[in-house]
Image: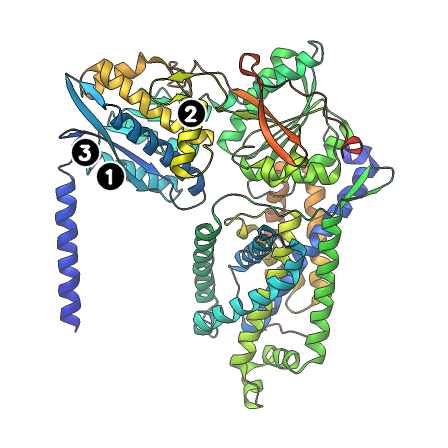
Amino acid sequence: MDFLIFKAPMLMVQASLDGILLGILFALIAYGMALQWGVMNIINIAQGDLVILGGYIAYTMYLAGIHPAWGVIVSPIIMYFVGVLLYKLVINKVVDRDLFISILATFGIAIVFQQLMNFIFGADVVVAQSEYGTTMLFDNSVTLPNSKIFSAFISVLYAVALVVYMKKSRLGRAIRATAQNARAAKILGVDTEKVYAATFGINAALCGIAGALISITLTLHPYVGLPYTVRSFMIVIVAGLGNLPAVAVSGMGLGLFEEFADYILGTEFRIGAVFMLLVFILVYRRFKLSKKREYLK
Amino acid sequence: MNKLVKLFITSISAITLALVSFSSSFAKVEGDYIVLGSAISLTGKYSSNGVHTQNGYNMAVERINKMGGVEVQGKKYKFEIIYYDDESNPKRAAQLAERLIKQDGVHYMLGPYSSGLTKAIAPVTEKYKIPMVEANGASRSLFTKGYKYLFAVLSPANQYLEVAIDLAVEKNGGKGVRIAQAFEQDAFSQDVRLGILDAAKRTGSEIIIDDKLPKELNDMAATLAKVKATKPDVLVVSGHTKGALTAIRQISEMKVDVPMLAMTHCDAAKLSKQHGKKSEYALCASQWHKNLSYKDKFFGGGKKYARDFQKEFGYDPPYQSAESSAALLVFKDAFERANSFDRDAVRDALVDTEMQTFYGNIKFGPGGQNIAKPMILFQVRCKGDDCENRVVAPTKWASDKFYHPIPKWSERS
């Protein structure tokens, strides 16, 4: 039973595709985290909760009779302002402080968000229906939900758009400049305060997109944010800050790793394997990492 | 300014202290009232089921009080419940149980929501010898610890899906079946799993997939791919509402064909509403259904209970509410038979409970679990886009025939 996957080659294909599609979605969340970590040096524990909030926005639209896929447009807009507001209220007070303070602050935000979502949307697990159907390959032995393909596609689309935006636009350049050296940027006339607010807003918007996609592919619940935070944290740790291709690869790698761990080690070790990998990578990085702060390229 | 603030704080603390010492003069019975205590999840992740539980308690208190209350030594008493919010947190629940007993002087407890929280409170009530009738902790381990003051009106978790395996074997002409199962790694779901293992052994069935789902998991694609490859006769899934919703979503998306699908928490997950036709033919274990023909003089039957509950709270009662209401009926019955407020007399009366309520028959086994009531299975059936749960087992109460095997996805519209 244990090595069923090696007996059935189609399972291998299924596992790989599942892993990659899910990994792309995780990579999107991780990219937001890498962005604001790189620019502001803040580890956002509330990342996953922003994702879930974005999901609830799409779910609310679904309840109102609008197709939840529109959430990938509406949710990031709302979430951008949530992010900016959050920055003005809390984050700007911890931005230059010790990393530990920012972890505590965002942890607090995470708890507040969870309770608020619980209060507003209730503690029931909910799903939005996309009715996108299924793509069947190899005579129905490999099935891919179209909603997952759709989410991977949207994730890639937004990621590419963001990269272009960062390279070409004025704000994008300002963000990159601030990430390289906030003080120098300030001296040269960049309004770093504005850049920080925008960065946090963009991160929240990315979470909003991911959340909307999760509402049609997985499930929503006020308290399931943490696993997303942990996964994006891992992806960023592996990929390094501000390196989008690396984030994408490490996202897909993580997705694949999880799926294969499930088949080979057993479902009960799936998440455990991910954490083991994290420990391993952290120890490895500890050896490799020099003290210099990495910056956004 | 500073002095004013200090004065303010001091006076607030003084008032609080005074209130606390006043409230500790509360006793088990205050005037005409029998005071019960309960820590309940009004916030946090169990809050929706916590509220169902509280509504069930409140509904029964109101009904019993209105219909004459509890008669002890010729005097009529009314029920009253002190609630505290345990925030869905076991540690907090244990603290609150201590507080209810030591500060509020409560001598009789009603259970919280969920097995986990009941497990946290049971050692406390046991320590102070406080009888607790609980309605929402089904984990088998609650009944194997030798607790003497714990009584549960519901069937233990290991019985949840045993019936389903029996049903599958029956459909297979009495021969053993091949079972694929996926259970979340928590006390409740693992107890359900033990029940399946027993049933498999008893019926000579074989378990071909035995996945344990991590708590954080919201993706079962790997398990379902294995199911697709191995083609079992039955797929059993238990992982609370998240497990039920994830399973149906992915089974329908991946077009997994199994002849029989059995689950828990379908009604809590509002499966037929959230997933509609995709959830059709799923078999679900339930403690109670309104169509069952049990009766009592307080609520009449299940259907009447459901109507009254709907009128009072604006939604159809889930079984969590029904079993909670039943807990109060058990207490009333025990007080009247004990004819005393002595804790041990009430406890002894609880041990001898043998009664019928609208929720089902109640008789406690040596561990405190209810041994008089079978679990029921319903199946989601749809007419057009309208889906509802219909009771299919046990046959005595079945309103509909069990539909078997589930048609293949390619044949489903």
Q: Nearer the viewer, residue A245 or A46?
A: A46
Sooner in the amino-acid sequence: mark 2 or mark 1? 1
Q: From the top left corner, tell me how far across and down residue B118 is, in percent.
A: 38, 31
Question: Which residue position holds label 1?
Answer: B99
Q: Which kind of residue does numbered mark 3 sit on? A: Gly
**Which image quarter is the C terminus of chain A in?**
bottom right
The residue beneath circle 2 is B304
Numbered disc 2: secondary structure: helix
Q: Nearer the viewer, residue B63 or B203?
A: B63
Label located before the other in sequence (1 or 3): 1
User: Whole-percent x and y of residue B351?
Assistant: 31, 14
Q: Is residue A257 left or right of residue A114?
A: right
Q: Residue at x 52, y 63 (%)?
A: A44
Q: Nearer the viewer, mark 2 or mark 3?
A: 2
**Amino acid type at mark 2:** Lys
Q: Can residue B113 be seen from the camera position used here?
A: no
State the SS at label 3.
loop
Disc 1 marks which amino acid?
A: Arg
Q: Nearer the viewer, residue B39 or A62?
A: A62
Q: Is residue B36 above or below residue B300?
A: below
Q: Tell me, yes or no, if residue A30 can be seen here.
A: yes
Q: What kind of element bears circle 1? A: helix
**Callout 2: chain:** B
Estimate the spatial distance between the alpha carbons at disc 1 and disc 3, rounded to whole Å: 8 Å
Find disc 3 in the rendering and name its residue: B105
Which image quadrant is residue A164 in?
A: bottom right
Residue A142 on image: x %, y %: 81, 40
Residue B99, horizontal then vertical, whole percent: 24, 39
Disc 3 is attached to a residue of which chain?
A: B
- Outermost residue toward the bottom? A188
> Who's the residue at 52% across and 56% down the image?
A49
Residue in view at x 44 percent, y 29 percent: B306
